[in-house]
Image (cartoon, rainbow, N blue to C red):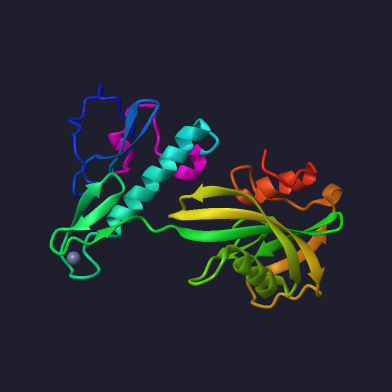
Amino acid sequence: MLNNNGGTHDIPEKPLSSTSNPHLFGEHDNIQLYVSESCTDSESLPEGYEWIGLRETFNLLPHPIYIEAGKASEILYFDTHHHYCGICGAPMEWHTAISKRCTQCGDEIWPQLNTAIIVLVHKGEKALLVKARNFKRDYYGLVAGFVETGESLEECVRREVYEETGLAIDNIHYFGSQPWPYPMGLMIGFHADYVSGDIALIDGELKDANFFDRDNLPPIPGKMSMARMLIDSWVKGSEFRS
Ligand SMILES: [Zn+2]
């Protein structure tokens, strides 16, 4: 994926119409970044190498390179899901590093991010942690959900907390954001304060929800997630991203 023009591949100067060929999508430290589809059979790898998933690279790559790898994954997803124009049905081709254009009607499209919020709700010295039905591991995270059409981020935060837990909140304030390329997302984190209500798992997305003390936490998500960053900020007593 990374190439400094010193490799053995014949790298094209311009973006191509398909990521079956290398597609130039960006630059990092004066190194041009390309993405392409590749077979993943182990026989094609040099001895001592193995294929790993993007999530696993979080703990192996320098963070800026992990971010670029995530962008590459999103560009590849965008390409493979937009072969044809949604208006006239003609083939699409790359127009810029991050956009495609219809070969007939000229309509230009960019990758569309799925925007999601995630929120840590404070109640005095306690924080609201939840266990989702779809969590693969047995840990507690935070209330989260996708922003709907026509909705502000604050409205989404209030709606998701109410739908998942039955609680009313206020004093919503921004914490930070994070690209979430699984497959194409932007996660936006908030802190908020509990106002009223008793916990009720209204929409059935959760297995459990409860307020926890800092010194009595259940298992929580790993370091790569916005949920963990929010929980760590609360544990440290800092509600702003460091
Ligand atoms: Zn078209």
Residue 59: quadrant of the picture: top right
User: In the shown orientation, is residue 167 left or right of residue 204?
Assistant: right
Ligand 1 occupies quarter: bottom left
Most frequent secondary structure within the magenta stretch:
loop
Q: Residue at x 63, y 42 (%)?
A: 223
User: In the shown orientation, is residue 123 left or right of residue 180?
Assistant: right
Picture coordinates of residue 201, whole percent (x, y): 71, 74
On screen, 117 above or below 199? above
Picture coordinates of residue 16, whole percent (x, y): 19, 44
Can you say which quadrant of the picture contains the C terminus? top right
Residue interval drawn in magenta = 39-57
On screen, 6 above or below 136? above
Picture coordinates of residue 195, whole percent (x, y): 80, 69
Q: Residue at x 54, y 70 (%)?
A: 151
User: In the shown orientation, is residue 80 left or right of residue 53?
Assistant: left
Residue sitting at the far bottom: 202
On screen, 183 above or below 208? above
Q: Tell how many labels.
A: 0
Can you say which quadrant of the picture contains the N terminus? top left
Q: Foreground: 186 or 74?
A: 186
Q: Residue at x 66, y 55 (%)?
A: 190
Residue sitting at the far top: 6
Q: Residue at x 74, y 65 (%)?
A: 170
Q: Foreground: 192 or 56?
A: 192
Picture coordinates of residue 30, whole percent (x, y): 35, 25
User: In the shown orientation, is residue 44 left or right of residue 50?
Assistant: left
Q: Is residue 124 magenta?
A: no
On screen, 135 above or below 219? below
